C-alpha cells in the first residue's frame, strides 16, 4: 500500500503546530497503524529528520497510552484503540490525517503527544476506596450480587485513554469520570465514600477545565471499551443524590 | 447547596433541565389553549380573558397570570444564563478544532445552541407582537386576541418567523427532553426507548399543535 | 582482559534474612524479629520507588500509608499504564473456597515444582501464605472480580493445576488489580504522602558510602537530568523480556533500572530464566513491533496440530484428518494440549524447525476449535472464548470460527532478575527489588496466574514489613550533598552517555540494532540453547555493541521530548544484559524450566535437570562492560518439596 499522511507536527507545548505531509510506501495491510508510523519514523531518522512523537506502550489495547485522531475519529475508523487498528482498514492511495487529542485540559507536549495528567487528578480527588493495606476483612464477608459486580466491571474497564474527551465537541471528561464513579459507587465497598466521591471528582473535573455535557453521545461512540453513555446519567443521579444529602446535613 | 449547584457543570445542567421542563409544561398548556382558536373568536377571547381571572376570588385579577409570568421569566433567564455560561465553558474546553472535520451527532443535538438563540429572539418578538402589541402588524387591540392572531398570520413574515420558531421548538424539545432526563438521572437502559419516544412525541405534538394556528389562518379556516 | 566466558566463581551468596525453623512460621518470625520504625519518625524517611506496576504501585501506596515519604517514578504518562495492566488470566490464592483440597501448602508445592526446583522454599511459602490476604485486600479496594449468582467470588483452574484457585476479572485481571493499586496510590498522592513523577525515567543508581541513596532520572518532557535522594531505593521496574525485541512486553518496558543497579553492585540472578509463552499470535512480517498473547485457557478446548508432511501449504480445511499431526496429544498422551508452557512452546518450535510450521514464514502451528465447536456448539464456544476470538480476528483478519487459529510461542516473562534476600534487599544495602524485577519466587518457570500474586505480595505485604528493618537499623543517614563526588560521578556518566548517543550521528536507527540483537537472542538464547549457539551469540554481541557506538543515529537533542534517545539509551543496556543472559545460559549446562539446553535431554527429548551440579541460583557480579563477571552461587535447599523429574507423558 502507498499512503499519504498528513500529520500534526508541533515542536513543543509553546510552539505553533501545523500539518505536514509525508508519503509512505510498501505498507502491509497486516501492519498496525502504529507500525505504519514506525516505518515512517525509521525513514525520517535516516533522512536526518525528527521522527513523529506519539504515545504508545502495550500495543495490545489495554494500557490506554495510544491516542491519535485519525481522519477526525479518536482511535480511527474502527471501535478499538489506535494500536489495534490495522492498515487493512484503509485503501491503497488513501490520504490519512493524523492529529493529537484536542482539548484545553490535554495540552500538546509534542507532535501527537498530549498531557493527560488531568485524568490522574480526577482519580486522586476521590476515585478510590479508602482501604489501607492490612485493613481488609475476609473477601467473602460481603457478597456482591452478580448484576452489581458485572455493572461495576463494565465501568471499571475504562482504560483512561481520553478518546471520550477527544471526541467530545465540548472537550468534556464526563464519560471518564462517570465510569469510575459508577464502578465504585455500586459496590458495597465503595458505599461509605459514595457522596464525597462523586462531589469531589466532579468538582475536580470542572477545575481541570473540561467542558460540560451536551449529551451528544460522541464519547460513547469513540470509547474503545464500550463504556455506555448511560454512565453519565448514573453519575448525574449520584451527584444530585449527594448534593441533596449534603444540603440536609 | 445553591452555590454548589450553580458552580458545577453538572449542577448548571440541572438548572437547565428543571427550567426547561417548566417551560415545556407551559408550552403544553399554551398549545392546548391555542387550539381554542378553532372554536371561533368568542370562545378564544373568552378563554384569554379567563386566564386573567384564574384563582378568583382568592387571587386578584391577573395575579395568577403574573405569577406564571414571573416563574416563566425566571425559568427563561436561568435556562439562558446557564446555557450561555456552559457554552462559553465548552468552547474554552476545546479551543482548537480538528483539521479533519466530520459531521457529528444528530441534527437536533447540533442545533441546540442556535435553536436556543432563535427561540430566545422569538420569545421577545412574540411578546412584543401578541402580548404588548408593540411590533404588531395590524391595529393591536387589548382584549381581542383572536383578531390579533389573525392579523399576525396574515403577513408573510409573521408566518415565516412563527413557523421557523416552532420547528426550532420541536428540535429543541426532541433533544432537550431526553437530555433533561439524563441530567436528572432518571434515564436508564430499560427506560431509554420510552424516553426517546416520549421526547419525539412531545416534539411532534407541540410543533404540530402550534403550527395548526398559522396554517388555519392561511387556509382561511380561521379568519 | 579475560575473555567474557572465563568468569571466576566467587564466594557463595547467602540469604542471611530467612529465619530457620518450620517453614510456616518463618514469615511470622521474620516480621517479629525485624526492627520497626517509630510511626512518628517515618515521616522523616524518604523512600524512592521506581515503577508503578502491581509491585511498585502497591508498595508506594502501602509505604505512604505507613507514614513514609515516598517519591515515585514511572516512564509512562500516568502510573495507571504500567504493563501489569496487560495480564489477562488471573491471580492465584490458596483460599480453598471450592473446598477442592487446596491449601497454602499445596500452592507452595505447586509453585516450587512448577518452577522446576530452582526457587527458594522460604520465599515461595511466604508467597502462598500471603496470597490469601491479597484477595481480601483487592476486594476491599473495589476490584470487580468475577462473581457467581450467590454474590460470592468465582474461581477457575488455570495452567494445568488440579484445583480451582485462580481469581479473575474476565480477561482483564491485571488491569483491574493494577487500577486497584493505582487508586490506592492516587489516594496517597492526593494526601501529599507520595510525590509522583510520571514521564520520568530512572537512568542510574546513586550509591553513597556503600548504600543506595538515590537515583538519577531524566524528565522525558524537558530532558532535564536530575538526582533524587532517599534513605532507601525500591526497584519495581519489571522484567527484561524486551531484550528479545519481539515479546509480549510493552514497547517501552526496559531493563535500564535493574541493569544500572547491577552495574552499581547489585548481583543479577538467573538471567537466562526466561519464559516463552506458547499461545501468542504469530508475527506477520518484518514490520512486527510486538507480539500479542492469547490466553492460555484456549488450550483447554483447542487442539494443536501441524501437517504431517513438510512444506504442506494447502489451506487447513483441505488437509485431511489422517494427514494432520496433533503432536502434543501424540507425544504427551496424558496431558495432551495442556502440558506446561515451556513444553508446549518447545514442541511448537521443534515441528516448525522440521519445516512443518504453517502460515507466513512457517512460524506457526494451528490451534483448532473445529472439534470444540462440533462438540459444544458455536454458542458455547462463543460464550467461553468470544472476546479472545474477536481479538484474534481483529489482529489477523481471519475468522477463528471458520479457520483454525495460528499461534506461535513468544517471550513473555523473565524469572531472572536482581538477586534479593528474604527481605527483598539486593546486595547493595538499601536497594530493594520487587515484582518481576527480582528473581526469587518462580525458579526456572513461572506458573500461570502467579505473576500478579507475586507482584502484589511483594508490594502490599512483604516489602512494607521488611524495609522497616533496614530503615530502623540506619536511622540517621544525613542528607546527601548534591555535590558529593559519588553523586557528581553518576550524574556526569549519565550525561556523557546521552551526549555520546546524540553525537555519533551514524547511519543506523536504534530500532535496527534492537531488532538485530533480538533476532540473535531469539535464535541462540530463546526456546532451545546449545553450547555452540550461545558461544556464537557471545561472539556476536560485543560486535553489535561496537557497531552500535559507531553507527547509531539519534536525531534531536537531549533537552527535549526525544523518544529516539530514550530508545537508544535502553538498547545500550540490552546490549550488555544480553551478554550476561547468554553467559548464564552457557554456564548452566542443565535443562530446567524455561531454560532448555539441547545437550541436557532425557532419551525421549525432555528437559533433564542436573540437581547435583545446579541446585543453586546463579548470582552474577558486574566487573565492567564486556568483562567476565563473577559468579556467586546461592545453594538451594529443599526441605519440604523434594526434587523430582517432571513428567507429563
Image (tube, coloured by chain):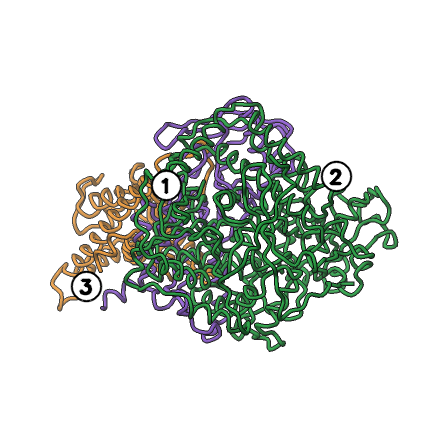
Chain colours: A purple, B orange, C green
Image mark 1: chain: C
Element under label 1?
strand
Q: Which of C207 and C200 is in front in this view?
A: C207
Q: Which of C243 and A222 is in front in this view?
A: C243
Q: Which of B115 and A145 is in front in this view?
A: A145
Name the residue tied to disc 2. C361
Element under label 3?
loop
Name the residue tied to disc 1. C227
Q: Distance between the residues labelled 1 and 2?
A: 48 Å
Instruction: Give coordinates of residue B163: x percent, y percent.
Output: 35, 43
User: Can you tell which quarter of the image residue C441 is in?
Assistant: bottom right
Pick whichever of labels 1 and 2 is earlier in the sequence: 1
Quarter that holds the N terminus of chain A: top right
Instruction: Give coordinates of residue C286: x percent, y percent.
Output: 66, 35
Q: In this view, does A7 lie above or below B218?
A: above
Quarter that holds the C terminus of chain A: bottom left
Q: In this view, does A90 lie above or below C398?
A: above
User: Can you tell which quarter of the image residue B185 is in?
Assistant: bottom left
Q: Is residue A59 left or right of residue C582?
A: left
Image mark 3: chain: B
Q: Is residue B114 left or right of residue C20?
A: left
Q: How far apart are marks 3 and 1 (CA)?
A: 79 Å
Q: Is residue C453 above or below residue B111?
A: below
Q: Distance between the residues labelled 2 and 3?
A: 88 Å
Q: In this view, does C185 lie to the left or right of B73?
A: right
Amino acid at each position: 500500500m502507498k499512503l499519504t499522511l498528513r500529520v500534526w507536527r508541533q515542536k513543543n507545548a509553546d510552539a505553533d503546530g501545523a500539518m505536514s505531509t509525508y508519503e509512505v510506501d510498501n505498507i502491509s495491510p497486516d501492519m498496525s497503524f502504529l507500525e505504519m508510523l514506525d516505518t515512517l519514523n525509521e525513514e525520517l531518522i535516516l533522512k536526518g529528520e525528527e521522527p513523529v512523537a506519539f504515545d504508545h506502550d502495550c500495543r495490545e489495547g489495554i494500557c490506554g497510552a495510544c491516542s491519535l485522531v485519525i481522519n477526525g475519529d479518536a482511535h480511527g475508523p474502527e471501535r478499538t484503540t489506535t494500536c489495534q487498528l490495522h492498515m487493512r482498514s484503509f485503501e491503497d492511495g488513501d490520504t490519512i490525517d493524523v492529529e493529537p487529542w484536542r482539548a484545553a485540559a490535554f495540552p500538546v507536549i509534542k507532535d501527537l503527544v498530549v498531557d493527560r495528567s488531568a485524568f490522574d487528578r480526577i482519580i486522586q480527588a476521590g476515585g478510590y476506596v479508602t482501604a489501607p493495606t492490612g485493613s481488609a476483612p475476609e473477601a467473602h464477608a460481603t457478597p456482591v450480587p452478580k448484576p452489581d459486580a458485572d455493572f461495576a466491571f463494565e465501568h471499571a474497564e475504562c482504560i483512561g485513554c481520553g478518546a471520550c474527551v477527544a471526541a467530545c465537541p465540548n472537550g468534556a471528561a464526563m464519560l471518564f469520570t462517570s465510569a469510575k464513579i459508577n464502578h465504585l459507587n455500586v459496590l458495597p465497598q465503595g458505599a461509605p465514600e459514595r457522596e464525597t466521591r462523586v462531589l469531589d471528582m466532579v468538582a475536580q473535573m470542572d477545575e481541570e477545565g473540561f467542558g460540560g455535557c451536551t449529551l451528544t453521545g460522541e464519547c460513547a461512540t469513540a470509547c474503545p471499551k464500550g463504556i455506555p453513555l448511560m454512565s453519565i446519567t448514573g453519575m448525574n443521579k449520584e451527584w444530585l443524590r449527594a448534593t441533596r444529602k449534603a444540603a440536609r446535613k | 447547596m445553591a452555590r454548589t449547584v450553580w458552580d458545577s457543570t453538572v449542577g448548571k445542567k440541572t438548572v437547565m433541565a428543571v427550567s426547561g421542563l417548566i417551560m415545556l409544561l407551559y408550552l403544553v398548556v399554551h398549545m392546548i389553549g391555542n387550539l381554542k382558536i378553532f372554536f371561533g373568536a368568542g370562545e378564544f377571547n373568552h378563554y384569554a380573558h379567563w386566564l386573567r381571572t384564574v384563582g378568583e376570588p382568592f387571587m386578584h385579577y391577573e395575579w395568577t397570570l403574573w405569577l406564571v409570568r414571573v416563574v416563566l421569566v425566571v425559568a427563561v433567564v436561568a435556562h439562558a444564563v446557564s446555557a450561555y455560561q456552559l457554552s462559553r465553558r465548552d468552547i474554552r474546553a476545546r479551543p482548537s478544532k480538528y483539521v479533519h472535520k466530520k459531521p457529528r451527532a444528530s441534527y437536533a443535538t447540533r442545533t441546540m445552541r442556535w435553536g436556543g438563540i432563535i427561540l430566545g429572539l422569538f420569545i421577545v418578538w412574540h411578546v412584543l407582537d401578541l402580548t404588548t402589541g408593540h411590533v404588531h402588524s395590524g391595529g393591536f387591540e387589548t382584549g381581542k386576541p383572536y383578531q390579533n392572531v389573525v392579523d399576525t398570520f396574515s403577513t408573510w413574515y409573521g408566518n415565516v418567523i412563527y413557523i421557523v420558531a416552532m420547528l426550532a421548538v420541536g428540535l429543541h424539545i426532541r433533544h432537550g427532553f431526553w437530555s433533561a432526563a439524563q441530567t436528572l438521572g432518571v434515564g436508564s437502559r430499560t427506560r431509554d426507548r420510552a424516553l426517546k419516544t416520549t421526547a419525539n412525541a412531545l416534539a411532534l405534538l407541540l410543533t404540530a399543535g402550534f403550527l395548526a394556528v398559522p396554517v388555519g389562518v392561511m387556509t382561511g379556516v380561521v379568519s | 582482559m579475560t575473555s567474557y566466558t572465563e568468569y571466576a566463581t566467587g564466594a557463595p551468596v547467602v540469604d542471611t534474612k530467612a529465619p530457620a525453623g518450620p517453614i510456616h512460621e518463618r514469615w511470622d518470625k521474620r516480621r517479629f524479629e525485624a526492627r520497626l520504625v517509630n510511626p512518628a519518625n517515618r515521616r522523616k524517611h524518604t523512600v524512592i520507588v521506581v515503577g508503578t506496576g502491581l509491585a511498585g504501585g502497591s508498595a508506594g501506596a502501602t509505604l505512604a500509608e505507613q507514614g513514609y515519604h515516598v517519591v515515585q517514578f514511572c516512564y509512562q504518562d500516568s502510573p495507571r499504564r504500567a504493563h501489569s495492566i496487560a495480564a489477562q488470566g488471573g491471580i492465584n490464592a490458596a483460599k480453598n473456597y471450592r473446598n477442592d483440597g487446596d491449601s497454602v501448602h499445596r500452592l507452595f508445592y505447586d509453585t516450587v515444582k512448577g518452577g522446576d526446583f530452582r526457587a527458594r522454599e522460604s520465599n515461595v511459602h511466604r508467597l502462598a501464605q500471603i496470597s490469601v490476604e491479597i484477595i481480601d485486600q483487592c476486594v476491599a479496594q473495589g476490584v470487580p472480580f468475577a462473581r457467581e449468582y450467590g454474590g460470592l467470588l468465582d474461581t477457575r483452574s488455570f495452567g494445568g493445576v488440579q484445583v480451582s484457585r485462580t481469581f479473575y476479572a474476565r480477561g482483564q485481571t491485571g488491569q483491574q488489580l493494577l487500577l486497584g493499586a493505582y487508586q490506592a496510590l492516587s489516594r496517597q498522592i492526593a494526601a501529599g504522602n507520595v510525590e509522583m513523577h510520571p514521564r520520568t525515567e530512572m537512568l542510574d543508581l546513586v550509591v553513597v558510602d556503600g548504600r543506595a541513596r538515590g537515583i538519577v532520572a531524566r524528565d522525558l518532557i524537558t530532558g532535564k537530568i536530575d538526582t533524587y535522594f532517599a534513605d532507601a531505593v525500591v526497584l519495581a521496574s519489571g522484567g527484561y523480556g524486551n531484550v528479545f525485541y519481539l515479546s509480549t512486553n510493552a514497547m517501552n518496558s526496559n531493563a535500564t533500572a535493574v541493569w544500572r543497579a547491577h552495574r552499581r553492585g547489585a548481583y543479577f540472578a538467573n538471567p537466562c530464566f526466561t519464559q516463552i509463552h506458547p499461545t501468542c499470535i504469530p508475527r506477520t512480517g518484518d514490520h512486527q513491533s510486538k507480539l500479542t498473547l492469547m490466553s492460555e485457557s484456549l488450550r483447554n478446548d483447542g487442539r494443536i496440530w501441524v501437517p504431517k508432511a513438510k512444506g504442506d501449504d494447502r489451506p487447513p480445511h483441505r488437509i485431511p484428518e489422517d494427514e494432520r499431526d496433533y503432536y502434543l496429544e501424540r507425544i504427551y498422551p496424558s496431558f495432551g494440549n495442556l502440558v506446561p508452557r515451556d513444553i508446549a512452546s518447545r514442541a511448537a518450535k521443534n515441528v516448525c524447525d522440521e519445516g512443518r510450521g504453517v502460515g507466513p514464514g512457517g512460524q506457526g502451528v494451528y490451534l483448532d476449535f473445529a472439534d470444540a465447536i462440533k462438540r459444544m456448539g458455536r454458542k458455547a464456544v462463543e460464550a467461553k472464548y468470544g472476546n479472545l476470538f474477536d481479538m484474534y480476528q481483529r489482529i489477523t483478519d481471519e475468522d477463528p470460527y471458520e479457520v483454525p487459529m495460528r499461534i506461535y510461542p513468544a517471550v513473555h516473562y523473565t524469572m531472572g532478575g536482581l538477586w534479593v534476600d528474604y527481605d527483598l534487599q539486593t546486595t547493595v544495602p538499601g536497594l530493594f527489588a520487587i515484582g518481576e524485577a527480582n528473581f526469587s519466587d518462580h525458579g526456572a518457570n513461572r506458573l500461570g496466574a502467579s505473576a500478579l500474586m507475586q507482584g502484589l505480595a511483594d508490594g502490599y505485604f512483604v516489602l512494607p514489613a521488611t524495609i522497616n528493618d533496614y530503615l530502623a537499623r540506619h536511622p540517621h543517614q544525613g542528607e546527601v550533598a548534591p555535590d558529593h563526588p559519588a553523586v557528581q560521578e553518576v550524574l556526569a556518566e549519565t550525561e556523557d552517555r546521552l551526549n555520546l548517543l546524540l553525537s555519533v550521528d551514524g547511519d543506523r536507527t536504534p530500532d535496527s540494532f534492537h531488532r538485530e540483537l533480538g533476532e540473535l537472542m531469539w535464535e541462540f538464547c530463546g526456546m532451545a540453547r546449545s553450547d555452540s549457539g550461545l558461544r556464537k551469540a557471545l561472539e556476536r554481541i560485543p560486535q553489535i555493541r561496537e557497531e552500535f557506538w559507531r553507527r547509531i543515529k539519534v536525531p534531536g537533542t537531549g533537552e527535549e521530548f526525544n523518544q529516539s534517545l530514550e530508545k537508544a539509551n535502553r538498547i545500550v543496556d540490552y546490549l550488555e544484559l544480553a551478554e550476561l543472559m547468554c553467559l548464564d545460559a552457557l554456564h548452566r549446562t542443565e535443562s530446567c524450566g524455561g531454560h532448555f539446553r539441547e545437550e541436557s535431554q532425557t532419551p525421549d527429548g525432555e528437559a533433564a535437570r542436573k540437581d547435583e551440579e545446579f541446585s543453586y541460583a546463579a548470582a552474577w557480579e558486574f566487573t565492567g562492560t564486556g568483562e567476565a563477571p563473577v559468579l556467586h552461587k546461592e545453594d538451594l535447599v529443599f526441605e519440604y518439596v523434594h526434587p523430582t523429574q517432571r513428567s507429563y507423558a
